[in-house]
Image: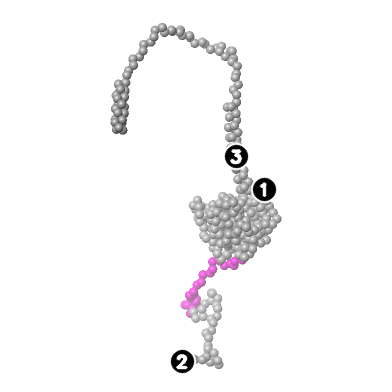
């Protein structure tokens, strides 16, 4: 078959590109109506978010090895509530904490929430601004997750939360620093791609008993009442560092008591109660074994006692009559039966 060759002198005519026009401009071929208005055939709705995503905050949420199921559920709940968060594998216990700065750099994150487990019963939370700092270390207590049925609230996944802070956060400098850290970590950036443009829940940070209480509530539209969603936990501040996961100490909580010290005091109190019981028993035994002191008789003790009437002594001169002996009638029969049994046994053996 002969293949048709393209002629070099006569290039093939290509269709011209259609010129771009504005969304509101009428089509060139559209015919105006009776009143002179051009009918709109295609109407594209505007995007939901008209702004641009400028705040590029990304939070890395992960933990060390050795956490229990409750900590794992808490970590997953925070990832669900924070669409600007990222996850990573568990970190080995042997690694130093400053390695987390490199992990955040590789993950392109500038904030970090790190859960550190010790002795499989103590949970610590690190909040850090990587890599410059500052960072804060907390002891996490009274953890309750989203899966618990006591919390009946609900909110849209990816919606942006309101942040509510106790007035105490504006009175003391270390609380003011923590407030800024909480705002940068827990607030969802505006126009984030994974976020929804709605506000239907609120994060509350309350200072009570030298601890920070975290709660998450749903905002009901009808009457603006609050229903708790979860999770909830209590943060007991330990230290605030100038750097990320280390550096000079900016603040140390004087009211903090370590879990080891708390458990030691409980053991000492139990031992003191046991020791006190043993001492009481020893005192009682000494009292029982002690020699009794004889008290001399008081001669005036029997002054008011009236003597009883003395009965005359009767002497019996006649011998009392003997009681008749009643013989058992069944006894001789039993003896005969025993003798007969012995005879039968002797005869059978012979």
Of residues 347 and 244, which is closer to you in this image?
347
Secondary structure at badge 1 equals: loop
Whether residue 47 is in magenta: the answer is yes
Frontmost of labels 1 and 3 is: 3
> Are there few (<14), some (14-19), or many (20+) residues within 10 Å of tag 3?
few
> Are there few (<14), some (14-19), or many (20+) residues within 10 Å of tag 2?
few
- The residue identified by callout 3 is 271
Q: Position of residue 102 (x, y in %)?
A: 64, 63
What residue is drawn where x is 53% and y is 12%? 305
Q: Earlier in the sequence, mark 3 or mark 2?
A: 2
Query: In the rendering, which numbered label is found on residue 254?
Result: 1
- The residue identified by callout 2 is 1
Secondary structure at badge 2 equals: loop
Q: Is residue 170 visible?
A: no
Q: Residue furthest right?
A: 248
Secondary structure at badge 3 equals: helix
Q: Earlier in the sequence, mark 1 or mark 2?
A: 2
Q: Residue furthest front?
A: 350
Residue span colored magenta: 31-54
Q: Is residue 296 visible?
A: yes
């Amino acid at each position: 078959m002969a293949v048709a060759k393209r002629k070099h002198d006569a290039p093939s005519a290509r269709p011209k590109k259609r010129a771009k026009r504005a969304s509101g401009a009428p089509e060139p071929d559209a015919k105006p109506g009776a009143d002179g208005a051009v009918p709109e055939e295609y109407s594209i709705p505007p995007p939901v978010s008209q702004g641009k995503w400028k705040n590029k905050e990304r939070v890395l949420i992960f933990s060390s090895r050795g956490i229990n199921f409750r900590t794992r559920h808490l970590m997953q709940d925070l990832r669900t509530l924070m669409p600007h968060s990222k996850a990573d594998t568990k970190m080995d216990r042997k690694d130093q904490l400053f390695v987390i700065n490199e992990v955040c750099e590789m993950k392109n994150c500038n904030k970090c929430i790190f859960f550190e487990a010790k002795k499989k019963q103590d949970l610590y939370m690190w909040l850090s601004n990587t890599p410059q700092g500052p960072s804060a270390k907390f002891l996490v207590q009274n953890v309750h997750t989203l899966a618990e049925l006591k919390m009946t609230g609900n909110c849209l996944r990816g919606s942006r939360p309101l942040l509510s802070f106790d007035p105490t956060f504006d009175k003391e400098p270390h609380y003011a620093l923590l407030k800024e850290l909480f705002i940068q970590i827990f607030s969802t950036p505006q126009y984030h791609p994974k976020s929804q443009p709605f506000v239907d829940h609120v994060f509350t940070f309350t200072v009570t008993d030298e601890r920070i209480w975290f709660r998450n509530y749903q905002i009901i539209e009808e009457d603006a009442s609050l229903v708790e969603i979860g999770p909830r936990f209590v943060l007991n501040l330990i230290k605030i560092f100038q750097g990320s996961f280390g550096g000079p100490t900016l603040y140390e909580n004087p009211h903090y008591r370590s879990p080891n010290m708390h458990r030691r005091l409980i053991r000492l109190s139990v031992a003191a109660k046991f020791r006190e019981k043993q001492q009481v028993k020893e005192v009682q035994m000494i009292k029982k074994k002690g020699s009794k002191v004889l008290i001399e008789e008081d001669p005036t003790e029997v002054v008011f006692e009236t003597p009883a009437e003395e009965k005359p002594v009767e002497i019996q001169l006649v011998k009392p009559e003997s009681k008749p002996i009643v013989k058992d009638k069944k006894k001789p029969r039993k003896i005969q039966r025993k003798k007969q049994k012995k005879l039968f046994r002797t005869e059978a053996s012979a």
